[in-house]
Amino acid sequence: MSIWQEIKSKLSVEDIIGEYINIEPAGSNYKCVCPFHNENTPSMMLSPSKQIWHCFGCGAGGDIFKFVEDYDNLTPKEALEKLAKKAGIKLEQKNLSKVKSKEEISDYQKVGVYYNGQVRYTTKFYSIYFWTVKTQSLNIA
């Protein structure tokens, strides 16, 4: 089990986020006003079963580490240290040397967003292409 998984197993998403903002039960999940954009109605959902959060207003989301990073404006290493302390887990220096910087993670996220957009565009293009071929009886496919 990685240090990240060990910390997640000891801390719940609703307890951590509930320390920062007011959350309300919504069925088996929780809802709250997103702290990352200006809104008046709850658009952020917390899933205790998946241990994640997602805002349907601004698209922000992630796990407890991502929330603490964004809310407290910390690096991944600092968020890991903060949550490890809260979970009562002592970190070894060798574990911390493997933690990537926030800039490196941000670069990976940008690549992921770009790739996701390209997959959506390609899927939509071929969907329209084959629909056109089929409905217009074009004998090219």
Image (cartoon, rainbow, N blue to C red):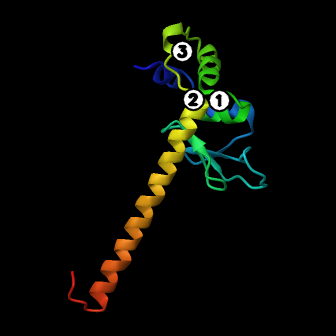
Task: Identify which residue, 138 or 20, lies in the foreground.
Answer: 138
Element at badge 1? helix
Q: Amino acid at mark 1?
A: Ile
Point 30% across, 92% down: residue: 136
Residue 9 visible, this orientation = yes
Tell me whether circle 3 and circle 1 mark residues in contact (CB < 8 Å).
no
Label placed on residue 12: 2
Point 34% across, 72% down: residue: 126
**Residue 94 placed where, x, y %?**
49, 9
Query: CA–CA distance between discs 1 and 2?
Result: 6 Å
Location of residue 121 with respect to 114 vertically, above or below: below
Label placed on residue 94: none
Instruction: Tell me the residue that label 3 is attached to.
Output: 96
Residue 46 visible, this orientation = no
Label placed on residue 16: 1
Viewed as shown, does residue 48 lie left or right of 1?
right
